[in-house]
Amino acid sequence: MESLNEMFQDVVQDIHSAEKQIIKALPKVIKNCKNEQLKSGLQDHLEQTKSQAERIEQLCKTLGFKPGGKMCKGMQGVLAEGEEHLGSAKPGPATDAMIIADCQKVEMYEICNYGTAAAWAEQIGMAEAKQVLGQILQEEKDANELLNRVAEGSVNQQAAQVAEMSMDGKAKTGSASRKTSQTPASKASMR
Ligand SMILES: [Fe+2]
């Protein structure tokens, strides 16, 4: 690959492949969620991901190249790892915490790719592409923030309580009161 134009096309095809793989993988992840906020957040993100794939397809049409024909191996690896984690898991707080961790790896990968693609689009003077890619980049950042809020607001604490209970055979004194005290959502932005 020699030109930024070719590299841009390549990264957009990579993005499209990643979105298609996520659309396939998310239903099983959602089925294994116990936490309602997590479940509905991922359900919304699945719908959003379908719309992202369509917007990328439309963008490719406008720019005159095909979106398909490339397999994003990076996303394939990230999703395979998540699938492996789900293999033996039972729905519950610990599995929810694992799902969030794995979904955040997906979001980070997407944030990298959309950030690169948007910057390259700007550099080569593709204003419309820059706008579309920048918009989706923001959606991925928002999805990651939501995962932070769910993790720090409830799921991590619930997962820790399950661990305490299985270590003691019963809940430690004081964990009942901690059950109701939620970490402020604003803490997530401190990450
Ligand atoms: Fe996405």
Image (cartoon, rainbow, N blue to C red):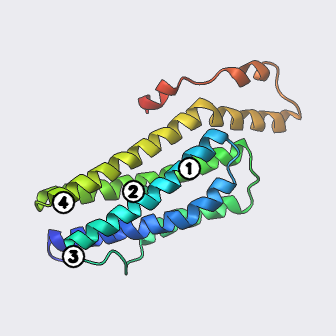
Q: Name the residue under label 4.
A: 121
Q: Mark 3 points at which residue?
A: 64
- Tell me if mark 2 has few (under 14), some (14-19) or many (20+) residues whose alpha carbon lies within 10 angstroms of its own: many
**Amino acid type shown at disc 1:** Leu
Q: Say left or right for 103 vs 139.
A: right
Q: What element does badge 4 sit on?
A: helix
Q: Where is residue 102 in the image (x, y as percent from the top left)?
A: 55, 53
- In the image, is residue 97 above or below residue 116? above
Q: Nearer the viewer, mark 3 or mark 4?
A: 3
Q: Residue furthest left?
A: 125
What's the distance in space between the residues labelled 4 and 2, CA to CA?
16 Å
Q: What element does badge 3 sit on?
A: loop
Tag 2 or tag 4, which sits nearer the N-term? 2
Residue pictured at 69% horizontal, 49% vertical:
95
Tag 1 or tag 4, which sits nearer the N-term? 1
Tag count: 4
Q: Do the residues labelled 4 and 2 touch (CB within 8 Å)?
A: no
Tag 2 or tag 1, which sits nearer the N-term? 1
Q: Name the residue under label 2.
A: 110
